[in-house]
């Protein structure tokens, strides 16, 4: 009887295991128990993958033996690719170590470098000897005769390797989704860069254009033809989905304003980087080290006022600001030193909106404050100065000599000032119930649902130019500090053109826990001893206890 029960039990276990195995081969499930849901793809990524209808091949070159930081990145890359593969059978992946074979090592390095894959040279002196390793934190993605590069490491000259790896892990889903989007969704939306009213030259917005170019078709658009053919200019402008006005410095005519107004009324989106005060740093670099700020009239006051925002003719000074580099000292003893410059506010972002969520500080230069006005248009403040702000009217004399004086903090009580505002909804025409400067076909007094972002400083989009070469937007060459200007503008353009999926992926937060390298070195011997000796001690104790139990039971 006892033998039968044992046999039935064994058979039941075998049948149960077979059933579990059969079910598990048919049904697959994964549970993401991480707090930041790092192993869960966003809905935007999943929706993107559904458009992949042919094999998409990924060649990952982050393969081989790496330092611990890169092993973290290597593991996370594999994990995110597995998540994508779970959503479609069309993704294939190859993990390639380009420097494994000594015979082809140099040739592979040369070919990959020529392809635009810049290697990362890791210098390690942890063992007392300096060694260098060449690592290619890149991937190729190929789909229907197209191949694009996917950077796996977000490089930054202002950050250490560990911080770069952490930021790269956060950006992995976006890096792959962004690459897939370029392959699967061809560019269709068009952006017009306004010209003809003293806007910034292309070399000063080169990095911005380079950033958005992979996603959209971009073309310059001059308003000069408004004078001779306003209706034709409007018809041509309406072919574009978004217009960008980068720091106009010359007043707009009424005809030009009507063209821009009717473009908005017919659903056109716009990004305005405009100023109401004339002043820039270059004006201060003269013998006197000073200049006078004056009001700038672009003839747009009624234009923005009607839509629900006003750019005031004053400057924001902020105790929380970026430094300016000045030569301190006399003659050959003078040295460049960073000194806080209250005219360069560092704007904090709104954490509750996809445009500005999880953004670095955005650097302004001579920004104007903005007021929002009551009407039916929805307003969202995207960027503000700190509470320790002060307003300075124009005209006023601004001198570099003032930078060495300690600011009177008691006067910086104006509170946060609006520096970037999003407008959404149905706009009322500036020319509603007014005499039109020219006859318009299909005049609309109320717009289709549309969007507009107004930024009260044209320098937000301006990159530095050194030796006639544009530099990275948001990076200050003299101080070595990086700001969030580029990411903010890319998010803004994506949002205005309804590419919100990529924004949500880009702003996803993942926290990585690292070991303290100093503590690891200090306790290395202790943990090696524990890892070797503890299992042996536990095994000996188990053997002793087992023998003791047997002797006691059978004696």
Image (cartoon, rainbow, N blue to C red):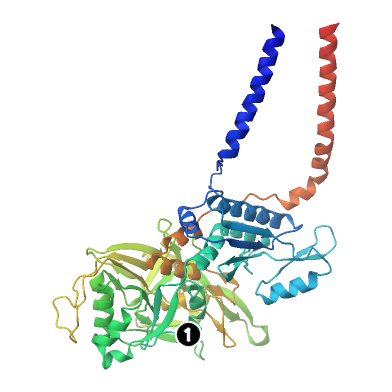
Residue 217 percent location from the top left of the image: 44, 77
Judge by depth and name the residue closer to the eye, 47 or 316. 47
Q: Residues within 10 Å of mark 1 (few under 14, many from 20)?
A: some
- The C terminus is located in which quarter? top right
Front position in the image: 230 or 306: 230
Spot occupied by residue 292 in the image (x, y as percentages of width and height)? 40, 86
Query: In which quadrant of the rendered view does residue 13 lie?
Result: top right
Instruction: Give the residue pinned by disc 1.
Output: 202
Give left or right: position of 39 versus 193. right
Determine the residue located farthest toward the bottom in the rendered image: 228
Instruction: Inspect this view and state whether residue 253 appears.
Output: no
Q: Is residue 303 visible?
A: yes
Residue 284 in the image, given as x and y percentages of width and height: 48, 85
Image point 35% across, 83% down: which residue? Answer: 395
Image position of 456 (left or right of 11): left
- The mark total stands at 1
Q: Where does residue 151 sit, x and y in percent of width and height?
A: 61, 66
Residue sitting at 77 percent across and 74 percent down?
107
Q: For the residue labelled by badge 1, is the local secondary structure a helix, a strand or a loop?
A: helix
Residue at image location 26% in from the left, 64% down from the top = 377
Image point (44%, 62%), residue name: 356
Position of 215 relative to 248 (above/below): above
Q: Nearer the viewer, residue 338 or 477?
A: 477
Locate residue 55 relative to residue 68 in the image: left or right. Answer: left
Instruction: Give the vertical position of 60 relative to 243 (above or below).
Output: above
Q: Quadrant of the N terminus?
A: top right
């Amino acid at each position: 009887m006892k033998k039968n029960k044992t046999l039935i039990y064994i058979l039941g276990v075998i049948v149960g295991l077979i059933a579990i195995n059969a079910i598990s081969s048919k049904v697959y499930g994964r549970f993401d128990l991480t707090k930041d849901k790092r192993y869960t793809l966003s809905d935007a990524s999943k929706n993107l993958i559904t458009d992949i209808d042919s094999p998409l091949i990924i060649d990952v070159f982050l393969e081989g033996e790496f330092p611990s930081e890169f092993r973290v990145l290597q593991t996370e890359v594999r994990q995110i690719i597995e998540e994508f593969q779970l959503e479609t059978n069309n993704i294939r992946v190859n993990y390639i170590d380009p420097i494994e074979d000594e015979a082809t090592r140099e040739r592979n390095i040369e070919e990959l470098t020529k392809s635009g894959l810049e290697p990362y040279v890791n210098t390690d002196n942890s063992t007392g000897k300096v060694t260098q390793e060449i690592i290619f934190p890149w991937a190729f993605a190929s789909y229907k005769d197209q191949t694009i590069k996917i950077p796996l490491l977000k490089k930054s000259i202002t950050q250490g390797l560990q911080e770069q790896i952490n930021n790269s892990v956060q950006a992995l889903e976006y890096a792959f989704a962004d690459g897939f989007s370029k392959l699967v969704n061809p560019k269709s939306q068009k952006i017009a860069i306004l010209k003809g009213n003293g806007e910034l030259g292309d070399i000063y917005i080169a990095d911005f254009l380079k950033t958005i170019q992979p996603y959209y078709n971009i073309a310059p658009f001059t308003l000069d033809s408004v004078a001779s053919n306003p209706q034709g200019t409007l018809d041509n402008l309406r072919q574009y989905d978004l217009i960008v006005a980068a720091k106009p410095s010359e007043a707009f005519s009424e005809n030009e304003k009507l063209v821009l107004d009717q473009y908005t009324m017919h659903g056109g989106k716009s990004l305005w980087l405009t100023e109401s005060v004339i002043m820039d740093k270059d004006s201060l670099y003269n013998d006197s080290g000073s200049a006078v700020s004056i009001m700038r009239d672009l003839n747009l006051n009624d234009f923005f006022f009607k839509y629900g925002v006003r750019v005031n003719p004053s400057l924001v000074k902020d105790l929380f600001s970026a430094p300016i580099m000045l030569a301190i000292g006399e003659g050959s003893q003078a040295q460049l030193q960073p000194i806080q410059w209250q005219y360069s506010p560092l704007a904090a972002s709104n954490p509750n909106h996809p445009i500005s969520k999880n953004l670095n500080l955005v650097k302004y230069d001579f920004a104007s404050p903005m007021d929002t006005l009551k009407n039916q248009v929805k307003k969202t403040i995207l960027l503000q100065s700190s509470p320790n702000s002060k307003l300075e009217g124009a005209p006023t004399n601004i001198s570099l000599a003032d930078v060495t004086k300690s600011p009177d903090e008691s006067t910086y009580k104006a509170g946060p000032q609006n520096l970037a505002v999003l407008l959404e909804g149905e706009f009322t025409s500036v020319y509603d119930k007014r005499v039109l400067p020219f006859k318009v076909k299909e005049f609309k007094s109320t717009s289709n649902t549309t969007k507009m972002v107004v930024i009260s400083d044209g320098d937000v989009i301006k990159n530095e130019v050194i030796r006639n070469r544009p530099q990275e937007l948001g990076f200050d060459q003299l101080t070595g500090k990086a700001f969030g200007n580029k990411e903010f503008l890319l998010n803004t353009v994506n949002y205005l053109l309804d590419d919100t999926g990529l924004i949500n992926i880009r702003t996803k937060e993942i926290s990585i826990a690292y070991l303290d390298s100093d503590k690891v070195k200090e306790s290395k011997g202790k943990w090696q001893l524990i890892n070797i000796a503890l299992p042996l001690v536990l095994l000996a104790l188990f053997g002793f206890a087992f023998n003791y139990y047997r002797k006691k039971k059978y004696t």
